[in-house]
Each structure stands twice: as structure tokens, then as C-alpha cells.
């Protein structure tokens, strides 16, 4: 499944890796921080077209746009049954 999410400044989205692998592609140059359930920084995406993958069943994460411009993120979910 593929989603494109646009995040305004300081807006967040929850990313759940239960039963799927998540690949994120930052489509715009922005400052997006991914934190785990314990609010610990797990990844920091800044460059346009930067790619990051969250492995299957590793938890729930939050991606937050910390830049002043909107951030577009392409999320590809590979479900494992």
C-alpha cells in the first residue's frame, strides 16, 4: 500500500510497523524527525528524496515536520501475513 502524506509545520503522523515494513521517502526538502514510542529520536530526514525503512514489528513511531515549510512523505507499506 502506498500513501502520500503532507505535514504542515509541527504536524505529526503515527507510523505503525505491526505486520508490515514501512519505507519512507521525503519528497520535499524538509526537517522530519522520527521518534519511537519512548520519544527517542530514531531517524532524522532532511534531504529531498532521502529514504528510510522501519523494519517489521519494531513498534510505533511518530514522524514530525520540524521545518517551516510543508513536508511531503511517500510511505510504502509491505504487509507480511
Image (cartoon, grey):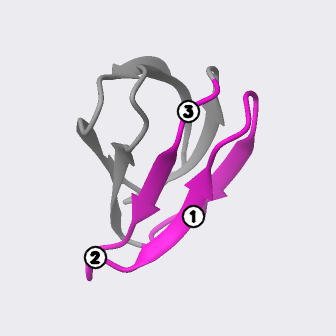
- Single out the mark in the foreground, 1 or 3: 3
* Inter-mark Cα distance, 1 to 3: 13 Å
Residue tagged 3: 30
Question: Is the Cβ of the residue at disc 1 closer than 8 Å to that at disc 3?
Answer: no
The image quadrant of residue 34 is bottom left
Percent position of residue 37, x then y: 27, 75
For the point 39% across and 29% down, the residue is 68
Q: Residues within 10 Å of mark 1 (few under 14, many from 20)?
A: some
Decide which of tag 2 and tag 3 comes sooner along the chain: 3
Question: Is the Cβ of the residue at disc 2 closer than 8 Å to that at disc 3?
Answer: no
User: Is residue 38 highlighted in magenta?
Assistant: yes
At x 51%, y 72%, the residue is 42
Residues in magenta, as a range: 29-58
The residue carrying pointer 2 sits among few (fewer than 14), some (14 to 19) or many (20 or more) residues within 10 Å by Cα, namely: few
Q: Spatial distance from mark 2 to mark 3, Cα to Cα?
A: 20 Å
Q: Is residue 20 rendered magenta in the image?
A: no
Would you place residue 42 above or below residue 49 in this image?
below
User: Label 1 belongs to which residue?
Assistant: 43
Which of these two is toward me, 75 or 50? Answer: 50
Residue 41 drawn at (x, y percent): 45, 73
* Residue 39: image tag: 2
Left or right of residue 40: residue 74: right
Residue 77 drawn above or below residue 44? above
Q: CA distance from mark 1 to mark 2?
A: 12 Å
Q: Secondary structure at mark 2?
A: loop
Q: Is residue 15 left or right of residue 47?
A: left
Q: Which label was assigned to residue 69?
A: none
Amino acid at each position: 500500500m502506498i500513501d502520500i502524506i503532507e505535514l504542515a509545520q509541527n504536524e505529526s503522523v503515527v507510523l505503525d510497523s505491526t505486520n508490515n515494513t514501512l519505507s519512507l521517502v521525503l519528497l520535499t526538502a524538509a526537517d522530519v524527525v522520527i521518534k519511537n514510542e519512548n520519544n527517542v529520536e530514531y531517524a532524522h530526514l532532511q534531504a529531498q528524496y532521502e529514504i528510510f525503512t522501519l523494519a517489521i514489528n519494531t513498534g510505533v513511531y511518530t514522524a514530525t515536520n520540524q521545518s517551516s515549510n510543508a513536508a511531503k512523505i511517500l510511505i510504502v507499506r509491505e504487509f507480511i501475513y
